[in-house]
Image (cartoon, grey):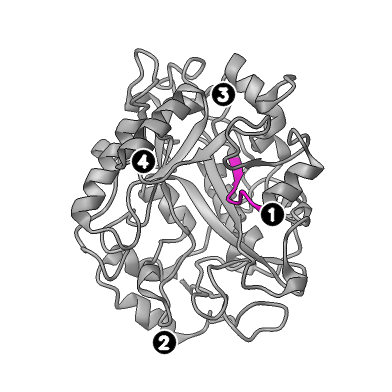
Amino acid sequence: MLALTAAGCGSSGSQGADLAGSDALADDVADASTPDVADAAVHDTTNDSAIDADDDLIPSDVTSDDGDAWVPFYPDTLVMDDVIRLNQIQIKGTHNSYHIESPESLPQWRYTMAPLDVQLESQAVRQIELDIHLTYDNDLEVFHVPFADPLSTCVKFKDCLRIVRNWSDRNPSHLPIFILIEPKDDMDGEDLKLVGRLDLVEQEILTVFRRERIITPDEVRNGHSSLREALVQDGWPTLGQSRGRVMFLMLDNAEHLDAYVLQRPNLEGALIFGRNGRGEPWSSILELMHPDRESRFQEIQSAVDENYLVRSNADDSDTPAAEAEVKGAKAIESGAHLINTDHPVMGSVSNQDPDYKFDLPDGVTAICNAKNAPEGCTPEILERLKPDYGASN
């Protein structure tokens, strides 16, 4: 068993010190109020490539670090895979999916997430969010805020991705995993800004995932002049075209995205979709939070009708449980596709109601979209993991 590492202050070439050997950190988190949260502190990485974070970047055409080739697996229960499309289901996601509460955390940062593969395996999560920072060693690290909120279940970006890829290799019939990337460099030094340097992010992605494992803007555009035209005329790929794969979304609609789109006006050759920009040729995914507000609820429904994918939220770290129950129900009713939570399990937020968590109905991994699912769609046919590796959902 290995203790979690942390990205904090003081290391050379990094925003922070490695606390992997800190007995205090393991003890602090192990004392958390529920087993779900305590599990995030000590994580068996036997099947994770993050076990050696200093390995050279692996070539993009290799199989999993477990030595298993990636082989598609399609149970005969997935009977509508050529009918149901990506925008006709709803899934659960986590906010700052790497995050561990630290002693310096502000009240709104007092939450701890399980390791990424635990979220995928046992918490019905199919969307994760990673905040990235550039180091002086030209590496990318994953953590929230330097010094004030630095703890992470996986420090290096490539190791976070490897954990996801290894789980994916073991469960090749899974629904696509949405990986949201936020270049969070507003508190980093000027020479560590990622504006105009997102090629570094793409290069690290391709050391872990082969390009064919990634749903890209080019694939969705499929010969059309723009993503918007493609989605209006053809729609999103089907589940059958998307299983066992990942899809990247940039959580920035300001200078990082502007520079990225300036280099790729229609996201030609890009690995990462852009957020928001409704009506722009490259726009395909919108973030519309607070579905419990009537005007926002209507805005989400309109966007779903226009074939956008919509990310919304069921709660946040400081929403009282009673309000969160209402917001989560409205998020599902609205048709939002990626529904984020800070409460994937009970007790994940230390200063909120320990009995609250957000799940889709019956705890399933995905549900048929409340707004646009085709007739005959049921949760049972949306995902079934390989029987000898994962539980059926």
Q: Are marks 2 and 3 in contact (CB under 8 Å)?
A: no
Question: Is residue 249 rendered magenta in the image?
Answer: yes
**Percent position of residue 349, x then y:** 31, 65
Return the residue nearer the eye: 89 or 160.
89
Query: Seen in the image, is 253 located left or right of residue 321?
Result: right
Q: Amino acid at mark 1?
A: Glu
Image quadrant in which you'd find residue 91: top left
Mark 1 or mark 3, earlier in chain = 3
Nearer to us: label 1 or label 3: 1
Residue at point 70% right, 34% down?
Answer: 212
| Residue 236: numbered disc | 3
Give the residue at mark 1: 255
Q: CA distance from mark 2 to mark 4?
A: 34 Å
Give the residue at mark 4: 391
**Percent position of residue 174, x then y:** 48, 36
Q: Amino acid at mark 4?
A: Ala
Q: Amino acid at mark 3?
A: Trp
For mark 3, give the secondary structure.
Answer: loop
On screen, residue 167 above or below 138: above
Q: CA distance from mark 1 to mark 3?
A: 27 Å
Q: CA distance from mark 2 to mark 3?
A: 48 Å
Return the residue nearer the eye: 180 or 293.
293
Nearer to us: label 2 or label 4: 2
The magenta segment is 247-255
